[in-house]
Amino acid sequence: MTDDTAPVTPYAGPLSLVVALASVAGFLDAVSLARITHTFVAFQTGNLVLVGLDVGRGNWSDAAPPALAIVAYLAGSALVPTVVRGAAGVRRVIVARLLGTTIGLLLVEAVLVAVVCGLGPGDAPGRVLRSVCTVLSGVAMAFQTPVVRTVDGVEVSSTFSTGMLTRLGQAFGALPDVARRRRESAVARVLGATVLAFLGGAVVGGALLEPLRNATIFVPVVALVVIGAATVRTTND
């Protein structure tokens, strides 16, 4: 069930869109955690665990980066209703604003990394730049998340997967029930594809990190430009 009273409507979209966006989020999380920010920027549940772990160990300074990512994501989410409200309910405009903001923030991050650290074999971002990148990426992922929240009536997310894994497991468990098999097969298809896309994006990010180093941060920007252009062109008002 979707929450029709939520400040932002749970927008429906095609499976291809959520798969593409989940791939970008998985890629960005992998690259960010391993090199750019040393935190997750989409998977905020992971950041909550990192904060708790570091606080429990008394490592307050280590808890700050993932805590900053959480705050950035919350701040970005708080801004989303205002941005959506200004689009007057026109779906194409909403998609353009959400993805345009995401692209703009990630592009600023990529340029900062390139200018400060260089590309290729350049140094990884220092503490101050990591914090700036954490904020930019966290807010960007908050704007990407509401672009599509349902596919064929199935609730999805392009930036986190724990809830989807729960529902996916339930769908698998319900498959023996003949009366529910058709619907649960559709649920398994949508959620399975989305979770695998997130994983696949992370795998590609990990594979490209060594040869591209800092330049990997430009990959999500290019991917989102392509995704955004295709989505806006095919989205009905």
Image (cartoon, rainbow, N blue to C red):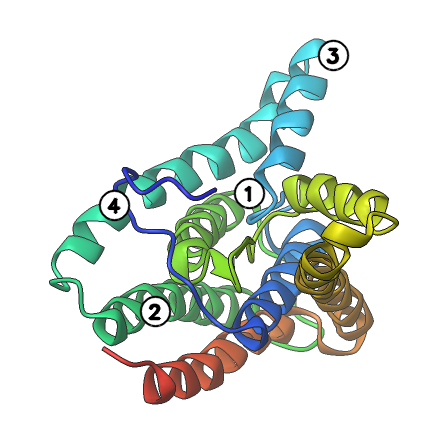
**Which residue is labeled 2 in the image?**
104
Q: Report x, y in % for residue 110.
A: 48, 69
Q: Picture quarter containing residue 118?
A: bottom right
Of mark 4 and mark 2, the one earlier in the sequence is 4
Q: Mark 3 points at which residue?
A: 57
Q: Mark 4 points at which residue?
A: 79
Are the residues tagged 1 and 3 within 8 Å (C-beta)? no
The mark lying in front, picked from 2 and 3, is 2
Q: Residue furthest right?
A: 176
Structural crowding at the residue carrying mark 2, measured as other residues with C-alpha within 10 Å and reported as few (<14), some (14–19) or many (≥20):
some
Q: Earlier in the sequence, mark 4 or mark 1?
A: 4
Q: How far apart are marks 2 and 1 (CA)?
A: 22 Å
- Sooner in the amino-acid sequence: mark 2 or mark 3: 3
Q: Which residue is painted at 56% across and 34% down in the image?
A: 65
> At which x and y percent is residue 168?
74, 48
Residue 27's image quarter?
bottom right
- Report how far apart the C-alphas of labels 1 and 3 lie in the structure: 21 Å
Evaluate if marks 4 and 1 touch, with contact meaning CB atoms under 8 Å apart. Answer: no
The numbered disc on residue 127 is 1
Q: Residue furthest front?
A: 179
Residue at 61% from the left image edge and 61% from the top image edge: 28
Residue 38, disc: none
* Type of the residue with mark 1: Arg
Q: Amino acid under label 3?
A: Arg
In depth, the one of 217 and 17 nearer the eye is 17
Disc with the residue nearer the chain's start (4 vs 3) = 3
Disc 2 secondary structure class: helix
The crowd level at tag 4 (other Cα within 10 Å; few <14, some 14-19, many 20+) is some
